[in-house]
Amino acid sequence: MTGLAISFEPLHVLREFRAFPGAIGAQLEQAGFDVLSLDTCAPFEDGATTIREVAEYWRAECPSLAEASLILGNALGGVVAHELGPHLSDGVVTLTVSAPSKPTERLRARFADVIAAVARDGIGPAAGLLESLAGGIPAPREDDGYRTERAMRGRLVNGLQALMEYSCEHSGGGGRHIAVVGSESQLAGRDDVCRCDSPKLIELSGAGMRAHLDRPDRVASVVGTVLEKDLR
């Protein structure tokens, strides 16, 4: 099988592309896919304030979206993938991990706590708070170069604010959607997933926000099923 998979990375202050798509990307490459990973949050450094603006940015900057057969997204990246759904063709499959496309008040309150920590304590402690809430296996760090405090603040504050304010206005998606969540997540869980596109919801027992790191075997099985059945 060959094809193009485009991955929308999660919200991060320093880039973590080894964490997502990580092993998922490696599995897809072994199956013959080309995998393109996008730094989803880059537009927040330049003043974007909404999920819709980020989705439109990537529609303009990444023409390859029109050629993809599989869209991946984790956390905020998954919400951007969800927002792009109506623009995808019927044959495209979207696989999201812990994507809060319909955030509950509980989740909004936790994001608000992190934003308040930025103003009170600074970027470092606030990012640490978000990391602790994500729980599970820590995401690998990959420092891809110097980033100013202003840029990091834009990513963290604008990104979380965009998630808090996101309200899906779609009546359905353009393809099939598999949504993976962890049963023990302190952030995005099953109740935070929008149902407008009738996603196949898979809740992994014992996994947290980073279900793909907490239960890599189970997620690999989900990806295998997507390759064998959904993309045939």
Image (cartoon, rainbow, N blue to C red):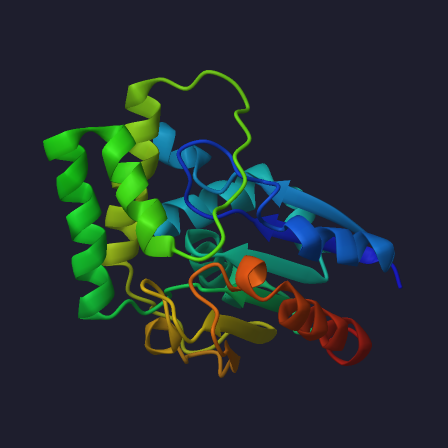
- The total number of labels drawn is 0
Whole-percent x, y for residue 58 in the image: 52, 43
Q: Is residue 223 above or below residue 72?
A: below
Q: Is residue 47 visible?
A: no
The residue closer to the viewer here, 215 or 21, is 215
Q: If the image is split into quadrants, where does the N terminus sit?
A: bottom right
Q: Is residue 97 visible?
A: yes
Asked whether, in this view, residue 154 is left or right of residue 64, the answer is left
Asked whether, in this view, residue 94 is left or right of residue 228, the answer is left
The residue closer to the viewer here, 151 or 46, is 151
The residue closer to the viewer here, 95 or 183, is 183
Which residue corresponds to the image point at 77% horizontal and 81% vertical from the top-left? 229
Asked whether, in this view, residue 95 is left or right of residue 169, the answer is right
Whole-percent x, y for residue 77 in the image: 48, 52
Image quarter for residue 122?
Answer: top left
Residue at the limit of the structure toward the left, as seen here: 120
Which residue corresponds to the image point at 67% horizontal and 74% vertical from the top-left? 222
Which residue corresponds to the image point at 36% horizontal and 46% vertical from the top-left? 131
Whole-percent x, y for residue 139 in the image: 50, 45
Asked whether, in this view, residue 10 is left or right of residue 101, the answer is right
Whole-percent x, y for residue 128 in the image: 31, 39
Q: Is residue 105 above or below residue 144?
A: below
Which residue corresponds to the image point at 47% horizontal and 41% vertical from the top-left? 57
Q: If the image is split into quadrants, where does the C terminus sit?
A: bottom right
